[in-house]
Amino acid sequence: MHKAWEYYDEIASRYDYMYEEPYWVLYHMLLEKLVSDQNIKGKILDLGTGTGRWAIKLAEEGADIVAVDPSEKMLSVAKMKARLNDVKIEFINAKGEALPFENATFDSVLAMGDVISYCESPQELLLEINRVLKPEGKFLATVDNAFAFLQDFVSNIESRNAEKFLNDRRVLIGDSTVSRIHFHTIPFFPEDIQSLLSETGFELTDMAGMVVFAPYDEKKLARNLENALIWEYRFCREHQLFGRAEHLFFTAMKG
């Protein structure tokens, strides 16, 4: 089975263009508000930086950024974008489970783009993140929402797949229109996140569903993104709506 980074190596040149639909614009607008709420400063590790969306944004705001990704081709795109945006970022090709940094190096760590879901061992990854964080450092991340996969299987009367998913907690994903490579994601229920954080020395401080009012009419959404953002942000932290989101955002503090 292929690794996630092999898939992203193959689609690196077109990755940014794959997320231009109104839904994804709204998703990233909401995520920017949620990250802004945390007021992260100092030295920041952008883990699984991909093509550098967050590394570049935070560097433009004056943060000291180190960006890590296992995909060399995604990093190549990120470096080009950093040069075009005239920002200084240290880019490193490495896996999250074996970070080349000393203990207590960073004030905050970001793992956006569902890095935890796509890694080989979420527990090993979080232990490593805990190691490189300073005391009381912040950890911000998104993951695939298990409710979304369960909804898809059950609504399509795929009981066998639903049971297999609940047993394995892994699902094969990948966009066949852009690559023949597929890889496993590990989706999380909200309580799974809480357990994983507790096991690896973190305290959960915030959680939100990413786009809880979907599906939208894309044409209407494109014309009313700011209005949709107001409502999404207003209700994204309502636990009873978490099951509607495809992704979950959370923040934790190192204990």
Image: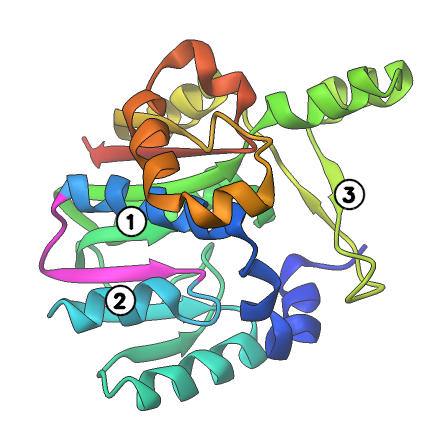
**Could you tell me which quadrant the C terminus lies in?**
top left
Residues tagged 3 and 1 counted as in contact (Cβ below 8 A): no
Instruction: Tell me the quarter of the picture where residue 140 sits.
Output: top left
State the residue at coordinates (79%, 66%).
179
Instruction: Tell me the quarter of the picture where residue 165 sits.
Output: top right
Q: Tell me the amino acid under the disc marked 1.
A: Glu
- Counting residues from the N terminus, which is met first, the one under dot 3 or under dot 2? 2
Q: Tell me the amino acid under the disc marked 3.
A: Leu
Most extreme residue toward the top, as rendered?
240
* Residue 121 point in image, percent of width and height: 56, 43
Q: Where 79 sits versus 57, above or below? A: below
Q: Where 227 sits versus 29, above or below? A: above
* Range of residues picked out in magenta: 39-48
- Magenta stretch contains residue 223: no
For residue 172, side relative to residue 198 (left or right): right
State the residue at coordinates (53%, 75%).
74
Q: Return the residue nearer the eye: 207 or 29.
A: 29
Residue underneath mark 3:
172
Residue underneath mark 2:
57
Sort mark 2 into few (<14), some (14-19) or many (20+) by Cα contacts within 10 Å.
Answer: some
Residue underneath mark 1:
32
Q: How far is disc 3 from disc 2 in space, using C-alphas?
A: 31 Å
Sort mark 3 into few (<14), some (14-19) or many (20+) by Cα contacts within 10 Å.
Answer: few
For residue 58, side relative to residue 125 (left or right): left
Q: Tell me the amino acid under the disc marked 2.
A: Lys
Residue 63, which numbered label? none
